[in-house]
Amino acid sequence: MIKEIEIAKDSSPYGIVFGEDDAFWFTQNKGNKIGRVTSQGTISEFIVPTENAGLSIIVKGANALWFTETTGNKIGKIDYSGNIKEHDLEHENSGVFGIAHNPKDDSVWFTLMNANKIGKLDSKLKYAEFTIPIDNSYPSFITIDENENVWFTLNQANSVGKIDKQGNFKNIPIPTERSGPVGICLGPKNTIWFVEILGNKVGRVNPDNTITEYELATPNAKPHAITYKKGDKLWFTQWGANKIASIDLNGNMVEFDLPTENSEPHGLAIGDEYIFVALECGKIGAFKDVIR
């Protein structure tokens, strides 16, 4: 049973993460706020200083959360009291979007879609960047594995990229042509999983750097974001089909319809008992006991 929590019709919830305070934190792309919602549905909101920042993805860091401001061209940080700090990026209109935190050195890594680069802020906020050696690859979502390799989807290059600790780049082509890879996450046993918004598939990067793909049952489902917490299931949103779904390690999938039609599900996050999904229609969807 999926219940929905009303935020505001014009808020456009987009990215979401489960915080250290046992609450879910989410970006409001049009509302220009960071929201906090508990499992009981209590909502708090914090205004981002930069107007029309175009808030996108949010991740958990050390004692705070980090988020991207795609239009504002900044990296934001919010602590659990709601205090926000913003960090300007070096390139104008860089298209910052995906973001990931490395708990081993407290660095954050992010994609710069328009600049065709991967950016990094270390624990002392020193900035570095890596140019992707494929023109107009459009890096999208990003994640970090247990060996500190950085993985990201290259939406226009039809591949998955990898940067190792030495800064070496690896390009892994996706078998399906024009698949439009977007969401990516670290899965069980240090595996990398991603979704293809145009290919209508879920993909897994194998240890030999090949890719296995699993086709969705619903045509034109437009899978967008994917996440994992524990066990043998990953969860992903189907933006075009108005569903969320699970996939196990053998590729078996189960789909769940969202109550509101055309709710536009984007990010999703798994808590202790609930999975919460950001619905761009102005709601947060809550689904209990899905992580078994």
Image (cartoon, grey):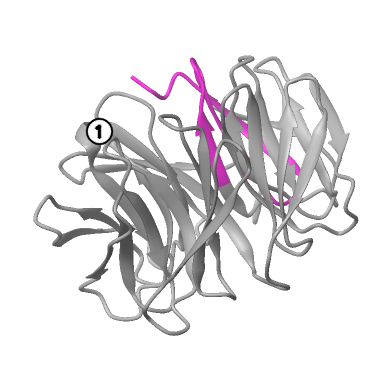
Taking the image as drawn, is residue 216 in sight? no
Q: Which residue is mark 1?
A: 188
Q: In the figure, is residue 116 to the left or right of 214?
A: right
Which of the pair 113/290 is nearer the observer? 113
Q: Residue 38 appears at what percent x and percent y?
A: 69, 19
Q: Residues within 10 Å of mark 1 (few under 14, many from 20)?
A: some
* Segment tinted magenta in the rendering: 267-292
Taking the image as drawn, is residue 129 in sight? yes
| Position above or below: 6 against 11 | above
Residue sitting farthest toward the bottom? 135
Q: In the figure, is residue 59 to the left or right of 216?
A: right
Which of the pair 227/125 is nearer the observer? 125
| Position above or below: 209 against 278 | below
Does the stretch in magenta take in 64?
no
Q: Residue 265 appears at what percent x and percent y?
A: 59, 50
Going 82% across and 55% down the picture, which residue do you hit?
A: 30
Mark count: 1
